[in-house]
């Protein structure tokens, strides 16, 4: 691979969280930063030639500026966007994981624990520092600060108990993602979307293939999205589910007639949370998609407006 002449630019590209690739019109990789080399299993030896059409067989070549989705050699779902350089003889490609599913939910529990600790700890510290700074404080005022310390300490104890309880339930009740036929996943989506007499039709036979999903999370994801879509889209129109696949990916389109959906509105919806238990453990819709290694976006073309979903196929 050839290193760009601008060493400062090359150094900056090396530390980006996304993969960056420079290639010629034939798909030969001229340079790639370390994340791209890692995700695409590209050789680090600059004298070794690698061609993107061979590394990513699902990527159209020459690439268009539209974002595409491919499976990496290790099976990771990747989002790829390409830009032709002046003259069209070289391309820059940006590669990023479409989603990254953690094998466990400990990071989520830890994040919620740390967020919950921040305020009580700050209040306790402020009350203790105030008492230490003013030893001659009036007894009634000092009692108020001691009450703050006691109240916030009890809040910390409750938070720790809730976190331990949630983690225990997770260990007892959580199961790995279930393998199911793609057709069963499509039926699950149709049932979840069919609310308020909304007609959801599966337009054709679903292609063969096995995907992985948590039935409860998947149903609740599409129930919530269905409610949002019901409010945003024209009433009285049916929704149509279409599916297609290759040997590595399954695409599912939720189609409708009429006005499209602004992409920024979908992004707002995906920040909403699903509460998973009585202790408040929750996941955003984006995290549910990531748990399934899926990606979802708005698309509009000659076939009309739709949401397009992509998931990996496992067999």
Image (cartoon, helix red, strand yellow):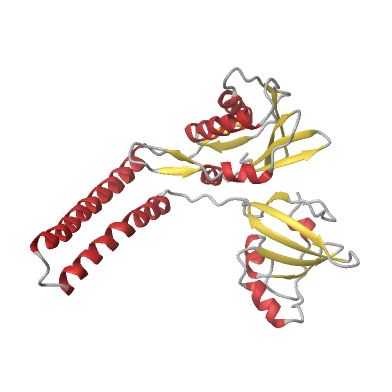
Task: List x then y, in percent, for residue 179.
Answer: 54, 35
The answer to whether residue 295 is visible is no
Name the outermost residue toward the right. 87
Decide: is 286 above or below 49. Answer: above
Q: Which of 6 and 265 is in front in this view?
A: 265
From the viewer's perspective, tell me whether residue 298 is left or right of residue 148: right
Q: Nearer the viewer, residue 212 or 164?
A: 164
Q: Which of 55 and 169 is in front in this view?
A: 169
**What is the count of numbered marks?**
0
Task: List x then y, in percent, for residue 66.
Answer: 78, 51
Residue sitting at x 84%, y 36%: 302
Give the image quarter of residue 305: top right
Q: Tell me the quarter of the image containing the N terminus.
A: bottom right
From the viewer's perspective, tell me whether residue 183 is left or right of residue 156: right
Task: List x then y, in percent, for residue 2.
Answer: 77, 76
Residue sitting at x 10%, y 59%: 140
Name the outermost residue toward the top. 197
Residue sitting at x 37%, y 37%: 277
Decide: is 234 above or below 294. Answer: above
The answer to whether residue 241 is visible is yes
From the viewer's perspective, tell me whether residue 128 is left or right of residue 270: left
Give the image quarter of residue 62: bottom right
Q: Tell me the quarter of the image containing the C terminus.
A: top right
From the viewer's perspective, tell me whether residue 288 is left or right of residue 137: right
Task: List x then y, in percent, for residue 142.
Answer: 13, 63
């Amino acid at each position: 691979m050839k290193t760009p002449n601008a060493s400062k630019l090359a150094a900056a590209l090396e530390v980006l969280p996304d993969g960056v690739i420079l290639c010629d019109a034939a798909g030969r990789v001229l340079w790639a930063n370390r994340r791209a080399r890692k995700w695409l299993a590209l050789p680090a030896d600059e004298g070794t030639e690698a061609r993107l059409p061979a590394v990513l067989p699902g990527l159209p070549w020459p690439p268009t500026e539209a974002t595409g989705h491919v499976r990496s050699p290790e099976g990771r779902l990747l989002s790829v966007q390409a830009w032709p350089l002046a003259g069209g003889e070289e391309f820059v490609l940006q590669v990023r994981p479409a989603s990254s599913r953690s094998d466990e939910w400990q990071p989520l529990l830890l994040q919620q624990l740390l967020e919950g600790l921040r305020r009580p700890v700050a209040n306790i510290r402020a009350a203790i520092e105030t008492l230490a700074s003013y030893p001659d404080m009036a007894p009634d005022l000092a009692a108020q600060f001691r009450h703050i310390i006691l109240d916030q300490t009890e809040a910390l104890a409750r938070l720790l108990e809730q976190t331990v309880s949630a983690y225990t339930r997770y260990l007892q009740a959580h199961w790995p993602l279930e393998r199911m036929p793609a057709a069963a996943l499509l039926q699950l989506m149709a049932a979840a979307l069919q609310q308020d007499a909304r007609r959801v039709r599966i337009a054709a036979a679903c292609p063969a293939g096995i995907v992985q999903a948590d039935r409860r999370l998947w149903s609740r994801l599409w129930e919530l999205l269905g409610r949002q879509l019901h409010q945003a889209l024209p009433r009285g129109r049916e929704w149509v589910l279409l599916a297609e696949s290759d040997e590595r990916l399954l695409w599912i389109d939720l189609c409708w007639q009429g006005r499209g959906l602004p992409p920024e509105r979908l992004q707002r919806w995906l920040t909403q949370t699903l509460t998973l238990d009585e202790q408040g453990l929750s996941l955003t819709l984006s995290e549910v998609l990531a748990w399934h290694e899926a990606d979802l976006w708005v698309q509009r073309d000659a076939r009309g407006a739709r949401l397009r979903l992509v998931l990996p196929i496992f067999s």
